[in-house]
Amino acid sequence: EIEDLDLFISVGGMDLGDEACSAGKKKSDFLGNADGQLGVTSVSITGEHPYGERPSRTLFVRNINSNVEDSELQALFKQYGEICTLYTTCKHRGFVMISYYDIRAACSARKALQNKLLRHRRLDIHYSIPKENRSEKDANQGTLLINIDSTVSNDDLLQIFGAYGEIKEIRETPHRSSQKVIEFYDVRAADEALRSLKQSDITGKEIELEPSWSVGARRKVVGV
């Protein structure tokens, strides 16, 4: 059974509160299809990031002309990378959201298109961070948490996990030397690494591997 899905997103700049669009959509509308079709859904926007914005794969684009076509938005933003999801239900309220698979694409698009004129309006673009009650699929921001013997080096991890995609960072968690965070630029690389390496051995050492959001939600071990 496909349940209705609400997505709450934190964005810099203001609290839209009740002004945001909020209509229930199915997961199939929200996620994008296997053949690359764009999912379209509504979103609820809340919160703000008062001290600067942390880059994310999703861009919140304000000051949108309601007459702009979805295909026009897609053509404009896909120049910077493959789009995972395009949210246009609230276009008539003056904003849309574009989610990329690769965080570098989102950063490039924001840099290139900030203040760009589109249908006589200047785009106002912000990074958007999913709230803790986000859906499981959207919560995976390309970051995996691994529990492994502390003798396994970062070079070993880079070689093994790097086979699935370019790694942005490998870092240790503050309180456990046997626990490390592996962050990919592209969420699809993280998904593939998780499917392939979960409950496997690395250099003869058994590992525990899971998306870091699942641990953060349970124990607040690591922030993503």
Image: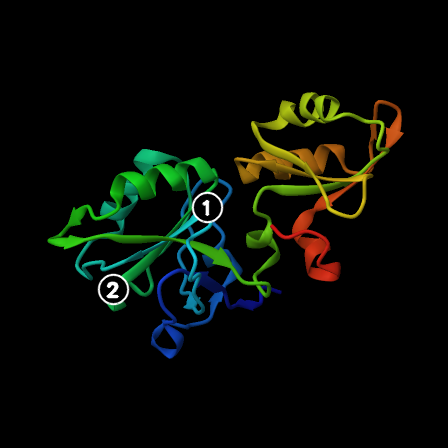
> Would residue 111 appear left or right of 12 to someone viewing this image?
left
Depth order, front residue of 52/148: 52
| Residue 160 drawn at (x, y percent) | 71, 24
Q: Is mark 2 on a helix, strand or loop?
A: loop
Q: What residue type is labelled 1?
A: Arg
Q: Residue at x 26, y 47 (%)?
A: 73
| Residue 165 drawn at (x, y percent) | 58, 27
- Residue 172, by quadrant, is top right
Q: Residue at x 73, y 54 (%)?
A: 221
| Residue 70 drawn at (x, y percent) | 27, 51
Q: Mark 1 points at which residue?
A: 57
Depth order, front residue of 85/109: 109
| Residue 187 drawn at (x, y percent) | 55, 40
- In the image, residue 112 sits, relative to residue 138, either above or below, namely above
Q: Mark 2 points at which residue?
A: 94
Q: What residue type is labelled 2?
A: Gly
